[in-house]
Image (cartoon, helix red, strand yellow):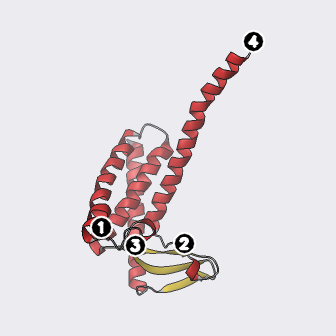
Amino acid sequence: MARFWSLSLLMAFLIIADQLTKGAIQSSLYYGQTIPVIKGFFSIAYVKNTGAAFGFGANGPDWFRQVFFLGLPVLFCGWIFWLLVKTLKGPFFISLAYALIIAGAIGNLIDRFSLGYVVDFLMFYWKDESNHFPAFNVADSCITIAAGLLIIDFFLQLKAKKAPEDHASDSVSKP
């Protein structure tokens, strides 16, 4: 139960950090404004993302955007929460991954429900801003880190599954 409360506290902290940073951007910058932090590499920018990752679906019809950017993410959060509870007694980093996904999804859902778009502000680029990676935020970072943890887990599970097979084949091949 301690893990659940620790992860709940982490999720609350990340959601608050996400919303505070987005609020700071909205109150300090005007839409479209960019402030270089590391010339030729990183800027803070006020970007409105009406789509999903990388702006996918931003120009879709309203019904599409409501279903895919409001309805499905709420259901998805419920499913991920169920997975979190189910994995609390397993490896910590799996529970952590699910907690990060929930925190990121809720942070972006708050924007979608209250603003109709997600505020993005971290922009990395090479040499000039026309060559930039899509802007993102704290919530997106949580989801990306979680995806990395789940990929690592996948390969660890694959390796663990393969190890007994390797030992079995070693003992069979030896006379």
Q: Residue at x 40, y 72 (%)?
A: 20
Q: Earlier in the sequence, mark 1 or mark 3?
A: 3
| Mark 4 burial class by Cα count in 10 Å: few <14, some 14-19, many 20+ | few
Amino acid type of the residue that numbered disc 2 sits on in the rendered structure: Phe
Residue at image mark 1: 65
The image quadrant of residue 22 is bottom left
Give the answer, above or below, for where 41 lies relative to 80: below
The image quadrant of residue 43 is bottom right
Discs 4, 1 touching: Cβ within 8 Å: no
Closest to the camera, between mark 2 and mark 3, is 2
Residue at image mark 3: 20
Q: Earlier in the sequence, mark 4 or mark 2?
A: 2
The image quadrant of residue 61 is bottom left
Q: Quadrant of the C terminus?
A: top right
Q: Which mark is residue 175?
A: 4
Discs 4, 3 touching: Cβ within 8 Å: no
Give the answer, above or below, for where 171 lies relative to 134: above
| Mark 3 burial class by Cα count in 10 Å: few <14, some 14-19, many 20+ | few
Distance from disc 2 to disc 3, alpha carbons, whole Å, reads: 23 Å
Closest to the camera, between mark 1 and mark 2, is 1
Element type where label 4 sits in the image? loop
Q: Residue at x 44, y 81 (%)?
A: 46
For the residue pair 138 and 31, the one nearer the viewer reads as: 31
Q: List x then y, in percent, for residue 111.
A: 33, 70
Q: List x then y, in percent, for residue 52.
A: 39, 66
Element type where label 2 sits in the image? loop
Residue at image mark 2: 133
